[in-house]
Image (cartoon, rainbow, N blue to C red):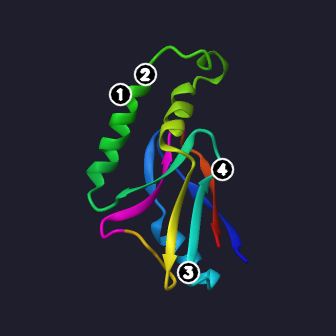
Amino acid sequence: MGITYEISVPSSRKEEMIDITGQIRELVKRSGIRDGICVVHAMHTTAGILVNENYDPSLKEDMLDFLSGISKGKWRHDLEDNNASAHLKSLIVGQSQSIPIKSGNLMLGTWQGICIAEFDGPKLRKVSVSIV
């Protein structure tokens, strides 16, 4: 049997990568589940969840620059609310990540962390964390 939590993550910029690794680790400990899977899911279509290097802050900016370079264009959805590129970036990054749990700990590599990628901020984002 598993448990699902919801956390709120505020963003302060139009685009940013926000480290949520510590919050996710706390939820895994709180769950009491020793071995299983942790699924982290952004409950939005203009934000995503990623697992990547979390040591060098310049890499987060590099990722945003990379995504900006491939999402520029004239998009039909921009006529509706001018955020088509945010939807496309979220599509590329994805809304969910699954991380194994072993002995009560997230099985992340030495430099890995979990981030929510904001592409249409600043906003208050909701993240679902299911631990089974």
Q: Earlier in the sequence, mark 3 or mark 1?
A: 3
- Amino acid found under the numbered disc labelled 3: Asp
User: What residue range appears in magenta?
Assistant: 109-120
Q: Residue at x 62, y 85 (%)?
A: 32
* SS state under label 4: loop
Rendered view: 124 above or below 103? above
- Amino acid found under the numbered disc labelled 4: Met
Identify the residue under disc 1. Answer: 69
**Tag nearer the camera, 3 or 1:** 3
Q: Position of residue 112 (x, y in %)?
A: 36, 63
Identify the residue under disc 2. Answer: 72
Q: Position of residue 43 (x, y in %)?
A: 66, 50
Dot 2 crowding, Cα within 10 Å, few <14, some 14–19, many 20+: few
Q: What is the quadrant of the N terminus in the image? A: bottom right
**Tag nearer the camera, 3 or 4:** 3
Dot 1 crowding, Cα within 10 Å, few <14, some 14–19, many 20+: few
**Tag nearer the camera, 2 or 3:** 3
